[in-house]
Image (cartoon, grey):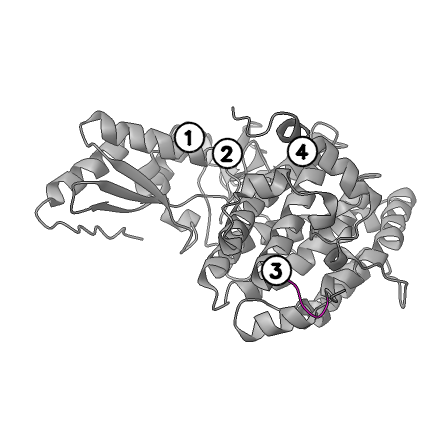
Amino acid sequence: MTDVYETVENPHFQYVLGLGDDSLILGQRLSECLSKGPALEMDIAVSNLSLDLIGQADLLLGYAGKIEGKGRSADELVNFRDAHDYRCHWLVEQPDRDWGYTICRQFLFSSYQYLLFERLAKLEDKELAEIAAKALKEIAYHRRFSAEWIVRLGQGTEESNLRVQNAINELWRYTGELFETTKWEEALAKEGKAILASDVEAEWVETIDEVFAKAGLSKLDDFYMVYGRHKGHHSEYLGHMLCEMQYLQRAYPGAEW
Amino acid sequence: MQVKLSVVNNGRPKAVQEIWTILEKVEDPEVPALSVVDLGVIRDIQILENNEIKIDVTPTYTGCPATLLINSLIKMAVEKVGFKVVTVNTVLSPPWTTEWISEEGRVKLKEYGIAPPVGKPETRGALFGVAAEVSCPRCNSFKTKRVSEFGSTACKALYKCGACEEPFEYFKCL
């Protein structure tokens, strides 16, 4: 059996697919909050974040389909893959237990995505660079919005501080996977087609430390980390999300408005 | 920023000008005060050798739900006056910025009740931002307060005026 950390079929496709899947799944997660936000301001904000992320997913998965060369559109990639063919990180699949979770997940991810896309925007792979440059402007808003909320919750009441700290304690185990890199990604990076996530880790930690210090919150040191996306392993939540998201196209393949 | 007109067939610049004039009447479906030209999303108009029209359009936000509608409104408006084959081509680079909203567009926005973008978009996203100092589109007071960074569409934030007490929308810098 081949080691997926050493080599995969069509690595360029797999790399862009992973970027698209992260935006898609987090966008889908946030869309579930629509009409359920704790206040109108938050409800509108997460809906807008969701829209941006799904817009990014459309561009990234469209490009992935083009690289793959089998004629699969973004919609087909979204609707006709099972969980084990998804390449999103575990972090973006995690459910919304309360606003503390929603904000914590967003801040951990947007801080990572910002640093990564800032570098992707300068890649030699021009098509990916253009998508990244476009998305980066939106991600800057997401990162700022979630960072401000982390501080607001951390410095709010005893209860809000406790809840967002609980979210950090729960979600921290999924942050290690963000910076995991494979041999085939290293090869892609040398060709100017990828950025190694490990290259942004130090700056990500600085961002987290700065904001958590301001918020009076703490991260977990030396915590057990969960990995698995490259092997097609995901949390149970992804399957449930796909059931709902893919239902219509699975029941009525190719249905259009 | 001025949009460069490029014409493959040099014999037809008049037609290109005509298309620009037509597009000045095509409204943004979400902000009908602005035309697609005011908004700065039309990047180039070309007449190809077989008289096909190619219009380069850039989206505002990646997930803007109006993008598809804007593209078909553009195609319909140009075809209606007799141009036969019109292709709307999506371009991502350079990414759209609110700097491209025309001066005329900014005046129209304000008249419509939406405060136009203030200042320049940040080149590197700040981790913590200061809310822009926005003047009320109704009474011009600067005694305004940001209520929400996100509004009814991705491109707008919600503000409230402390002088006339009216809520209003602000077109965010991007």
Residue bearing mark 2: B65
Q: Is residue A53 above or below residue A126?
A: above
The structure residue drawn at horizontal position 79% and vertical position 53%, both measured from the top left corner, is A233
- Inspect this view and state whether residue A3 appears: yes
In magenta, the rendered stretch is A5-9
Residue bearing mark 1: B69
Q: How crowded is mark 1: few (under 14 residues within 10 Å), some or many (20 or more)?
A: few
Amino acid at the residue labelled 2: Pro
Asked whether the residues under the numbered discs 2 and 1 touch, taking CB atoms below 8 Å apart as contact, a structural biologist would say yes
The structure residue drawn at horizontal position 83% and vertical position 51%, both measured from the top left corner, is A154
Sequence-wise, which precedes: disc 3 or disc 4? Answer: 3
Q: Which mark is residue A130?
A: none
Q: In this view, does B24 lie above or below B48?
A: above
Asked whether the residues under marks 2 and 3 belong to the same chain, the reply is no
Q: Which mark is residue A246?
A: 4
Q: Is residue A57 above or below residue B77?
A: below
Q: How far apart are marks 1 and 4 (CA)?
A: 25 Å
Q: How far apart are marks 2 and 1 (CA)?
A: 8 Å
